[in-house]
Image (cartoon, helix red, strand yellow):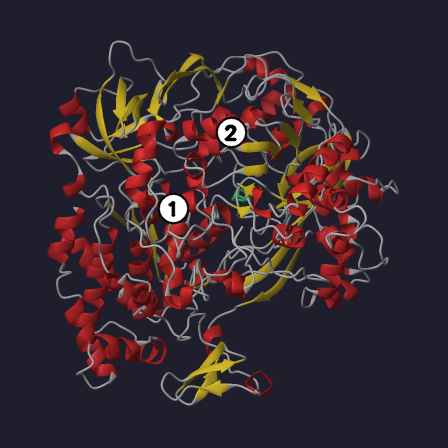
Amino acid sequence: MPFHPPISLVEQIAVRLGLLGDTRESSFDDSQRREDGTLVNYPPLDKWDDWVEYDSRNWPRRRVPRHYSLVPTICFNCEAACGLLAYIDKDRNTIRKFEGNPVHPGSRGRNCAKGPATINQVNDPERILYPLKRKGPRGSGDWERVSWDAVLDDFGQRIRKAIQEGRNNEVMYHVGRPGYERAMDRVLQAWGVDGHNSHTNICSAGARMGYQIWQGYDRPSPDHANARFILLLSSHLEAGHYFNPHAQRIIEGKMSGAKIAVMDPRLSNTAASGDYWLPTQPGSEAAVLLSMAKIILDEGLYDAPFMRRWINWSEYLNAKRPADERTFENFIAALKSEYQRFTPAFAEAESGVGAETIVAVAREIGRAGSRFASHNWRGASSGNLNGWEIARALHFLSVLTGSVGSVGGTSPSAWNKYSPRFWQEPTPVKSWNEVTFPKEYPFGCYEMSFLLPHFVKEARAKLDVYFTRVYNPVWTNPDGFSWIEMLRDEKSVGLHAALTPTWSETAIFADYVLPMGLAPERHDLQSQETHSGVWLSFRQPVMREFLRRQGKEVEFTYQANPGEVWEEDEFWIELSWRIDPDGSLGIRRHFESPYRHGEKLKVEEYYRWIFENAVPGLPQKAAAEGLAPLEYMRKYGAFEVSRDNYKRHERRLSAAELEGSETSSETEVITKGGKAIGVLIDGEAMEGFATPSRRQEFYSSTLVDWGWSEYAIPGYAASHVAPQNLDSSRGEMVLVPTFRLPTLIHTRSGNAKWLNEISHRNPLWINPVDARRLGLATGDLARVSTEIGYFVSDVWITESIRPGVVACSHHLGRWRLNREGQGSRWSTSLVDLKHEGKGVWRLRQKDGIRPFESNDPDSSRIWWSEGGVHQNLTFPVHPDPISGQHCWHQAVRVERAHAEDRYGDVVADTERSHQIFKEWLAKTRPAPGPGGLRRPLWFARPLRPAAEAFVISEPADK
Ligand code: SF4
């Protein structure tokens, strides 16, 4: 039956005048409608091979059909890994657009603005299309095009030599945006290199430590959709971290009646739509959370059965109250006593949040019981010295309410994340890399990546081959001028390759710039803990897959991509064969086909093996459709492995698991082969959690044994930006530099024109009270001074920030050194970079964002001129002595800009920065710990070396 959508009177007139086409002449065929006439949300699966849409670009000609092949892949603009569908024009062989993949279990067809903007990144006229090698000195901007062959030969020979000479740990792979589930661990293990480095310690190490010490899993996985009360610490996570998958489930929870509280000194979008906003003084969050714990305890709102079974309370009483009888009732009495001082009045005095609000939220949490969901990522836990205690205090509320692993509660991340295995695993590396895991940070979660320039300065580190992969430390990290000093020093960094899809402030200082694929230009596996369920998604180079569907196979992905943009998978396989061409180093065999003996692994074989052998249920599901597992993943791009993964800690151990095990009569922990595998709970053998006690560890013997006994139980310790640590004579305030604009993502959004049109300013947020005191009005320029320098920004006066605190988004302030290219002109300001000697650096904007000529007509239509201010350059490193997290918040002095100041000015002193590094290093209590260990054996570690490498006396140190 034909469907005629209604149109307004104005539209009818416009149609008569010929200004509009008549939409009543149905533009849609039946496949796009439900029976009631409404449109379906997504193209039906059976039409993905040949989907027809009318071409909007043919205006005024109407109803010009275009045929599309829809190929699934994964968004690469944040870690959420939402599904995308590439619409490939079958006649023009080009990607027309990206929309959501409806069968992706995490994103369910939805994306944030950054997902569809992938098309901007693909078509960016300024993207890097060919491998480049520098010609002049590093940073000179002088490049020549080289072949992939030449690149592989250069790196292959250099890495081979390093390995042959036992300098394995001078090879480092430093990743910004991860992915590739376990793939890089495998590559580096095969090379025998403990050289994995990441961005984690400038991001989530604080939160990870708080969760790790409780339960042995370092990330939370909230079940927002089924929650009755949701508490979010800082908005960052729901405006950036797992943004779209979490945001849609929070809204589902809200629509089902859940209430939301947000603790953040800034009124974020999330806070604005919550039921409670708790604008805490930065660093006081643990005081508020522990006060809530006290209320829950005092008012009997806790879940006694869960706590009795799953907290290591007996261990606590043994250690801290040896005179008490070991009963649960005594534990509860002890808990009340431990947290006596955390009255609502005390929490109010510390945080500035009204006591009545704290009590109200605590009661809501208590009433929600096991349906209390919470999350804490960056923000508070990454901003403050002792920030990890904030995550620990937050999880305490989940433990008190029995909402750990429950429906509507918060589960450990690992329960909801897929991890692949391979046909053959290289043996763990036997050495330990002192640069990434130095003795000073035995609990570091994880690599102490942002300290690298300081270790180099002190000759503790030297790199022969350094890969930065989608990583821009010069711009993203604190203390970027120290990174420039390190990268320019060819004696400290022998050969630097920037594997990147886009120009960056770091790529400028590389020896090679190697263009790597964007979301639709490479293979990858992704799985994230977006809800209670495990899913796996498959990133694939969509043009390569499209060509395959047309019967045109290519050997390498760069043959199907724009220019010679490649992908890491094939790059590492080829490089590994060049490192070990004859197989004598034992490396090559790890990169041989599981299907063709002794022959080089092909990228499709890598995924084929995993899909056929290591994804439970996938072969059966595929077979039901008459497909091979790889064909299934190519077609749908995602697979749901399991759902409703609640209460895994209560899983009963099987007879086979228990065979040959032992149970401690003291702790009831079940061990097998020296490894804890479960715990007896009320006489039943259960899996438990991943701690030594297999319980939730309220009392941490690990922290005690490693010399941090004052942190034995969740507590509240002052932040470096607590009021008592601010210099009131300088009028110091707290700068919160960690918040994210939901439309931007670190470096890669710089070359997405739509995103930059939406967001291109990062003014300093100031409360009117402070603005009056400082004599500032919206739009004025202010100088913001840190410990090592200052930046100059315009200001925005708003009541959306608490008095005494200023905030600036960290996603803007991109810059480039050259007028033409080498930095996306949609987002970068042209700057002068000067080293004035004795560690003092100065960056001044010469020009803002300007229209430019290119093959994209939109580049000449750029209307915005501001690109933001780069604040991170003025931050010294602040490594938390326990978690290793860089504590982002800054004690700053804000004043009117000086006469000589200009918008975007940045000045910083790297010598002063190095002194501050030493001051923070002095706060640590270095390994060895018990047994001569560098790190507790039960702590997670990327690229985990062999157990003997954990022992500090091992001579295998390199
Ligand atoms: S939340 Fe947005 S940026 Fe992140 S993966 Fe999803 S669509 Fe992409």
> Residue 369 or 33: which is nearer the viewer?
369
Q: Position of residue 237 (x, y in %)?
A: 41, 47
Q: Earlier in the sequence, mark 1 or mark 2?
A: 1
Residue located 17% across and 37% down the image: 726
> Residue 718 or 574: which is nearer the viewer?
574
Q: Secondary structure at mark 1?
A: helix
Q: Quadrant of residue 888?
A: top left
> Residue 226 or 486: which is nearer the viewer?
486
Label 1 CB-ligand 1 distance < 8 A? no
Q: Position of residue 219 (x, y in %)?
A: 44, 58
Residue located 54% across and 30% down the image: 491
433 vs 21, left or right, is left
Quadrant position of ligand 1? top right
User: Which residue lies under the disc numbered 2?
Assistant: 487
- Numbered label attached to residue 943: none
Q: Position of residue 452 (x, y in %)?
A: 45, 39
> Residue 786 or 795: which is nearer the viewer?
786
> Mark 1: few, some, or many residues within 10 Å (few <14, many ≥20)?
many
The amino acid sitting under disc 2 is Leu
Any part of residue 849 in sight: yes
Query: Does the residue at mark 1 contact the one at mark 2 (Cβ under 8 Å)?
Result: no
User: Which residue lies under the disc numbered 1?
Assistant: 378
Looking at the image, residue 439 lies above or below residue 733: below
126 vs 412, left or right, is right
491 vs 277, left or right, is right
Looking at the image, residue 904 lies above or below residue 148: above
